[in-house]
Amino acid sequence: MAGELLQGVTVLDLASVGPAARASRWLADYGADVVKVGPVPAKSGVQIAPPFFSYSAHRRMKRVLLDIKAPEGRDAFLALAAKADVVIESFRPGVVDRLGIGHEAVSAVNPRIVYCSTSGFGQSGPNSQQAGHDLNYLGTGGFLHLTGKDADGKPPVPGATVADSAGGGMHAVIAILAALLNRASTGQGRHLDVSVADGVLALMALSVDEYLATGENVEVGSNLLLGRYACYDTYQAGDGKWLSVAAIEPRFWANLCRLLGLDKWAAHQNDDAVQDEIRRDITEVLRGKSRDAWVAELAPADTCVSAVLSVAEVVEDEQFAARGAFATAKHPKHGTFRQIGAVLAGMVPSEDPYLVRESDVTDTDELLAAAGLSADKITALRDEGVVA
């Protein structure tokens, strides 16, 4: 589509799930030509097979299947990499080097390559070889500790995979774009060591930097953004649904107090001695109407009040609809379905439904031919089970 920011950038993605797959998803939505590189079925071993709709059903992506453990499969990958701009991998540190497709091998055939290695704890350090998932990185980065606890002190399981998406996927996208920008002026590629745990640590900067600067422990309820004051909290409405209140600025707080008939608390926003009383009064007043009735009254009045929406409500929200946040996709087996569209700034939404394919459809012959392999060579590799 015209006007796409990454038009002409070719990305080879060796990941099937996780942060790297999220990164390539966003790069594709910015217009990059993303090629998913997977193992040939007969030699793939145990693989995670995400549902067809995961990662936006791999819309706008091509697929090549290679047995990279075979010398000729490795060489085929290096032929693809020689003409690519970005390689993304998410193997455990050291694996790609043993396979002969690591940064050193790829940069030997393409010095301009931006090679992005994503892993849980990074390519170095005592935890670099540890297995993990989103919840582990949120735990080690301090996120879970400051996300609230139940009566037994148990941290919650968050409602979004923040580590995989922001700590890993967006972290990788930012690093890749910065490296591409640098390459435009220097002509040199870069090896990027994207640690999901490091990304979570970056997201925790407000709290961690506060502790480092002051030496004072940061806990749930210790400051405004961690629930210390009633002006920044969640409250239940009369119908059992919930509201988020984030009236940080004094004028927004004063507006809220006035509209709730609680003017007496307007001058006590940061008074620790009366926060329990303020919360009790707000809770009592908000029980008088439904969530949506309160949103209709308070949200337009500069109070920083919003609904806490369920996923089913999010996809029908009029604000997201007005922004064109959702798209339609067509799958040959599963039919037509909705999905989140190209929503990030600078992405170009599709005017037509995205056409997605069955997972066994590949572009192997086309891609290897473009990389310089002859038709006879490709046929031989296929016959030998090296490509599919």
Image (tube, grey):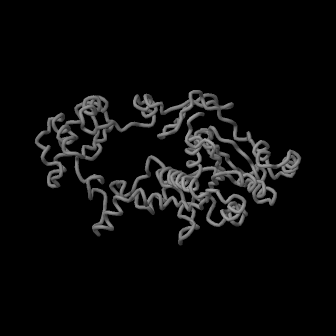
Give the residue displayed 50% in from the left and 32% down from the top. Answer: 326
Q: Is residue 46 left or right of residue 388?
A: left
- Residue 91, picture quadrant: bottom right
Residue found at the far left of this picture: 264
Give the residue displayed 57% in from the left and 60% down from the top. Answer: 192
Q: Is residue 142 left or right of residue 118?
A: left
Of residues 315 and 190, the one nearer the viewer is: 190
How many numbered callouts?
Answer: 0
- Residue 250, picture quadrant: top left
Residue 299, image x and y in percent?
Answer: 28, 33
Of residues 187 and 272, the one nearer the viewer is: 187
- Residue 60, picture quadrant: top right
Residue 26, image x and y in percent?
Answer: 55, 44
Of residues 176 and 147, the one nearer the viewer is: 176
Q: Is residue 261 left or right of residue 224?
A: left
Residue 281, image x and y in percent?
Answer: 17, 42
Residue found at the far front of this picture: 185
Q: Quadrant of the N terminus?
A: top right
Would residue 54 be visible to someone looking at this image? Answer: no
Residue 315, image x and y in percent?
Answer: 46, 32
Q: Is residue 120 left or right of residue 293?
A: right
Would residue 163 be visible to someone looking at this image? Answer: yes
Compared with residue 210, is residue 171 higher up or lower down, i.e. above or below? above
